[in-house]
Amino acid sequence: MTSRIYIFLFFILGAPLGVFAQMPNIDSLKNILPYSEAEERLTILNELSFHLREVKQQEAFDYALEAERLALSLNNKSEEAKAKENIGWVYYRRGQWQKTFDYSKEAYNLAIEGDDLQEAARVLNSMGALYYEQQNYPMAIVQFKKAYQISSKEKDLYTMIRSLNNVAFNFLQLEELDSTLNYAYKAIETNKDSASTYLLSYSNRLIGDVYLKKGELDSAERIYEHALESVEKQSITTFKVSLLYRLGNSYLQNGKPEQAKKVLLLAIDLASENGFLDELSKSHKYLAEYYRQKGDFKEAFNEQLLYIELYQTLENKSTKDRIALMQGMFQEDLDQSELDLMVAQYENQATTLAFNRRIVFLVSLGSLLILGLVIWLYFLNRNIQKSNSNLLLQQQQIHKQNEDLEAKSTQLQEINQTKNRLFSILGHDLKGPVGQVKSIVDLLVDGHLNQAEFDELIQNLKMDVDSVYFTLNNTLKWSVAQMEGFKLHKVYVNLSELVYSNVKLIKAQLSDKSLKVDISELPDELEIYADRDLIEVVIRNILNNAVKFSNPGDLIQVSAEINQSTITCSIKDQGIGMNDKQIKELLSDDNVITNSTLGTKKEKGTGLGLQICKEFTRMNGGELQIVSKKGEGTKVCVKIPTRNVLVSN
């Protein structure tokens, strides 16, 4: 047996876990074969072929051929792949590598087609062995790694360990020793779950080879000896011989010539008996080195001559087989490429012809469709023009109606908002004061009040009546201004007289809080052009707010500033002031009735005053401005555009 047969023994072998520990009962399988049919017979044939292909090649070959025929008739892709793998292996043993390649390739395709990934992984190991025979070690490693990935997914431990060992073996050929150790130790770690003695021995042999190449002879000897002890129990002669000549080599290098001679002679006997030519040549080579060290050059020459003769025989056959395999694989690829090219050219011509026919048909059909479409569009356009004219007229009418509806809707919303604001004021802010006046009048009429008590309440009564009057006046003025058809009546108004008359109206409130009003900076004869009633309401409300929010004893200043375009009347108090948020809310463009704030003596309000001031000022073409700071008072400015400003000397 040559070294190639030994290598392929490991690469191709795809037996289930524990195959070397416990071989199946071949006789039992043969006994039940005549009584089996269909799928059961197919499985038994493949099992017999697999387990006999190492020892009885022709018998295994016959079983595999029958399994192939039966698998084809049953359309069982997975079992057909196993049968072709066994046939390819037997061809490999016979040195027919091209047929090995062909059957292995077919087995792989069938395994993939039959979704038998476990079988596909085992066939990949076969393909890797063929690349090894070509000395294409990197490509062999690629095949073995693929086999490992597939078997890992399938949890096929035996194929996983085989693949890892094969990767390590090819890295050893490339002298990449660290990678060899890495994959060998990984195989040993994986082997813990399968307990395959043969695979473990193979992994250890790889580690021993690395130690031998590194010159760590003691470690190499221990590894080889341990592996030899394990393989003795398995009766695998080829593997045993490979360990013996390696151990003999390590003994020679480590200064143990007699131990080397003993194991080398044993290796020669076993190799000669079984026809293992590669192992026999290496054993003679190392035995020649033994005799050389001993000084027996005659025996050394004889052993070296035997080694050279065996090596040349093996090398010539190996070269011839390798060339045949390369030619076969190249021819396979060449034939396939030519076939693919012819098929592609034919398909391209057929596609082009079919495409041209479709183009002609589509152009003809398109022309007819376009002609029909043009005619249809002509009549459609006429109808659309008529319809568009009618629709345009209807759209104009609808648009006019929508505008009328929107105007009326807006008018109704404004009226409704005005009504709601008016009733809110009357309901909440007039009820209290009027109720209090009614209560006092009822007590007076019923005789429950004497003159002294009435005199005491008369001041409070007057304040309530003033409050009601002020609120009613504001409300009525504002309501009238909101009514449709309201017109401004602008006249020349003496601003100082207007301010003075309103100061007199609030004299009681000023006295109650001990407030003073300074109008010294207001020109006596300053006249403005505005609606008197509206401006009077504005001035009165601002003065009333100044009194309301001033602290007892404060000063209220009234002044006026004249420029080319406006007259600005300013009323400034020293009261509680406002923050920016309040000012922004009061001066917003929306008609918002804000919540009233109590004065410094808990005076109540309606929340309508400054809103009226803002609206009435704008109606007169002016602008309301507020400058205020919390705790430092407020300055309200009424800006009115000038027309004819008259100021006396």
Image: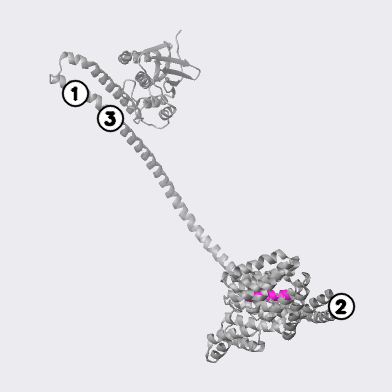
Sequence-wise, the earlier of marks 3 and 1 is 3
Instruction: Choose between 607 and 62: the one closer to the eye.
Output: 62
Residue 468: % across, % down: 27, 23
Residue under label 3, please give it.
428
Residue pictured at 21% horizontal, 15% vertical? 456
Name the residue nearer the viewer: 480 or 237: 237
Residue 485, how many percent across, how many down? 35, 29
Give the residue type that dot 2 points to: Phe
- Name the residue rendered at 66%, 89% in the picture: 58
User: In this rendering, is residue 566 above or below 313?
Assistant: above
Which residue extends farthest top? Answer: 649
Q: Secondary structure at mark 3?
A: helix
In screen coordinates, is 320 left or right of 582?
right
Quarter of the figure that contains the N terminus: bottom right
Is residue 466 something one can see in this rendering? yes
The quarter of the picture where residue 352 lies is bottom right
Mark 3 neighbour class, 10 Å CA radius: few under 14, some 14 to 19, many 20 or more: few
Q: Which mark is residue 204?
A: none
**Mark toward the viewer: 2 or 3:** 2
Residue 272 occupies quadrant:
bottom right
Q: Are marks 3 and 1 in contact (CB under 8 Å)?
A: no
**Secondary structure character of the magenta stretch overall:** helix
Q: Colour scheme in the image?
A: one colour
Residue at mark 2 = 297
Q: Is residue 517 left or right of residue 228?
A: left
Mark identifier at residue 439: 1
- The range drawn in magenta is 122-134
Where residue 361 appears, x then y in whole percent? 60, 71
At mark 1, the secondary structure is helix
Q: In the image, what residue type sits under mark 1?
A: Ser
129 in magenta: yes
Dot 3 amino acid type: His
